Image (spheres, grey):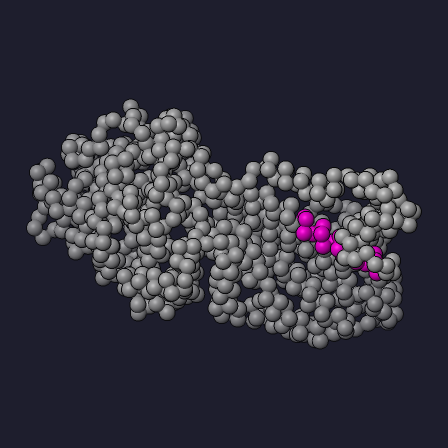
Amino acid sequence: MRTSNSRSTGRWHPSPPLILVGIALISLYANQSSRPHPGGTTVFASAQNVAGKFATRAKLTTTKKKKWSFWGNRRGEAITDAARDGELNDSLWRRLRRFFYGDDSSSSWEWDLFLAESRMIFVSVIASVLCAFFPLIWCSMPGKEISAGHDGREEGEVEDLVCDNPEQLKAGFFQSVEVGFEDVGMVLKQTKKDRADRVILDGSIRGRARPGRMLAIMGPSGSGKSTLLHAIAGNVKHDKKISLYGRRYINNETLTGDSRIPLAFIEQEVTFFPHMTVKETLDFQVELKMGAVLKTKEERDALVQDLIDQLRLTKSANTIVGNAKVRGLSGGERKRLSIACEMISSPPIIFLDEPTSGLDSYQAAQVIETLRRLADQGKTIVSVIHQPSQHVFQLFDDLLLLSEGRLMYFGEVSKVRSYMSDLGYECESEVGTAEHILDCVSRVVGADAEAERLSEKRIEVIASQAIKHTRELVAFGEDHTKKMKHIIDKTSTHPGTNVFRQFRLLLGRSAQELFRGKAAIMIKIVQQVSLGVIYGGIYSLGNNQASIMDRFGLLSLIIIGATNMAMAGTIRSFPKEKAIVSGELAASMYRTGPYFIAKALSEIPLIGFCNAIFGAIIYPLANLQKGRLKNFLGLTSLHSIAAESFGLLIGSVAPNSDVALALFPPVIVLNIIFDGKNIAEESIPWALRWISKIGLVKWGFTGLALNEFQGLEFESSGPFRGPVTKTGEQALARFGMDGKTLDSVVWAQSKIVVCCWMLSFMGLSLTRQKFVVMSNPPE
């Protein structure tokens, strides 16, 4: 831990002006300061000549010339012609040949142009990818933390407490931490003027959680228990309607409203990747969180084993975690695993939101006993607990009782029974303490008016006495003008390892999770086999006139089916994975870039495998054109990748799976409408023509049609459908596909894949969780 008076801390990354300076230096080096060369010209001037001739000659046409030849053939031709015309001096010509061709020796102009085209395409693609991804990566990088003027204070009144690595949580200021809070309140503002604002926490709440002790937050349902826990931790999700105020303290030091306390926060519902074992889950998280601190595998394995032993997970170490559909850990074991994952960096404070919900009494006792052992080791434990048994209740040291967002009691658990008795609410001997105090602070609803009035009066009495009692018990001092502390916990804002290790670990997890899902793989295989058999059993293509329409129909069905299966599978599965990944990204276990690249690459092998099965069945059964199977498999695989990337885009921007599934039908319908055969391109409304250019079905259908029809010759026999068509090229012309090539289809679908990946990356990067900053309480 280190202190600093600077208000701009965090990881530094270069500013845009420095980037521009770097680009200028590179350009200056490339032009060699426009140094004169023999012949009275300069590199810069010669380059201008080349550019002028290139611009004059390079005209985009709609002939068989490919669009990207603008960057390849024509540039090579311009340089070649400039050299032939003597516009380039010998030194510059050799320099250009070395850049575009790799040597300056003489060779055939055809081979030179081929190499120029290849090199320029490669350079253009790399430059485009870098230029496209740079702003996205820039946005996803954490910039400088700007904290000046917290809570209306000047820079000099705030002192930073910087925690650089997990090892600092075990010593110094953060070794033993007492968390205090007072005057905590939250108001939900109503949008309609005729409605009063809703008070969630009334501002009377104060208390403290001490090292080596367990604080229970209890109250009836809807009393604000989880809200208070999130407010103290600084984890209230951002909402313009929410107003949060209060003061927080660490070891009696006042914190700024945006300080992130170094703690482990275990939510009520914790999800894991279901096909990973307990040990693999801990191994993965230890590698990411502690990879920079624990250098050797032996040290990391020792930490994992220590966590397994400490949380009593030895028997289930090699059991998969599971979920609602996959059998795995029990509810109590899953809770203990979530605690183990948060204990990796050994935080001094642990917050838990209802850790016993959904567990039977035995499993609940196991979880709380685990927390008791951690508290005995000096940890500060704060837990929301709902209707605990008497055994579980007695394991806690302190109690904070709420009702309707108001403080009802704060103090020791052992004294709450006598406290209620002193107020006139005695507990019968056969009734448990936890049950009795919840009855005392619960409002009676649905009974007679007298019972409701008495319950309301009881709550008012207990609340007023609680304020007096707590102010005497908990005092933080009245001088709030002293220097405040601003905690910068870099252990929760920066990954614990480099991007290459992040990518390797994430790729391994994605591939492992994908290939261990045997049920999902079998379903996909059955789908491909079934479709192949159905299509092959219905279609038997010949060379007569009727087979032309049959071919178009079969290819259209293949593409529509592939689009449906690829998009639907991704849309159903990714939002569930996103719920896990969002939490890991919020905890800065890894960056968005490595995760997204690993996710995209891990699914390609299975896509190729499933399309190979389908192609091996449909191709011979339907009697498609011989010698084109490789192209068929490549085109269907590329189309499936494009469809999955589109599904990934929908899943990344949709808040949940329900919204994602609701977006799926209109997307499919639009793709089918603009598939190239249901409406002529000239008839599409001008404002909607862009849809056909990014249509998944259109480009997939076009690719398969070109692959199937080019080179085919048809007989004049059979049922006629209009004029006799003798060649496949004539059949393609009927659908406006004359002049198109497989290269243009591959290029178009590749651009769709890249654009969807980029937009998905941006969606994940820009939808990170934001939290409400706690302001000073009103005077």
Vertical relation: 7 (above or below) 341: above
Residue 16 point in image, percent of width and height: 59, 37
**In the rendered view, does 125 fall on the left or right side of 173?**
right
Residue reaching furthest to the bottom: 620
Left or right position of 42 against 374: right
**Residue nearest the viewer, comparing 650 with 56:** 56
Quadrant of the image containing the N terminus? top left
Q: Residue at x 42, y 33 (%)?
A: 7
Instruction: Give the left or right position of residue 263, taking residue 274 as reference.
Output: left
The quarter of the picture where residue 188 lies is: top left
User: x, y percentage for residue 637?
Assistant: 65, 64
Give above or below for 332 relative to 415.
Answer: below
* Residue 498 falls inside the magenta stretch: no
Q: Position of residue 327 (x, y in %)?
A: 38, 67
Q: Name the residue at the right extreme.
A: 85
Q: Report the magenta stretch's main SS.
A: helix
Residue 573 in view here: no
Please identify the quadrant where the C terminus is shown. top left
* Region in magenta: 110-128
**Front in this rendered view, residue 179 or 225:** 179
Seen as rendered, the residue at the extreme top is: 779
At a point 77% along the width and 39% down the height, the residue shown is: 34
Residue at 78 percent of width and 54 percent of height: 98
Res. 250 in view: yes
Residue 126: in magenta span: yes
Residue at image x 75%, y 55%? 119
| Residue 601 x %, y % | 58, 60
Residue 337 lies left or right of residue 769; in this view the side is left
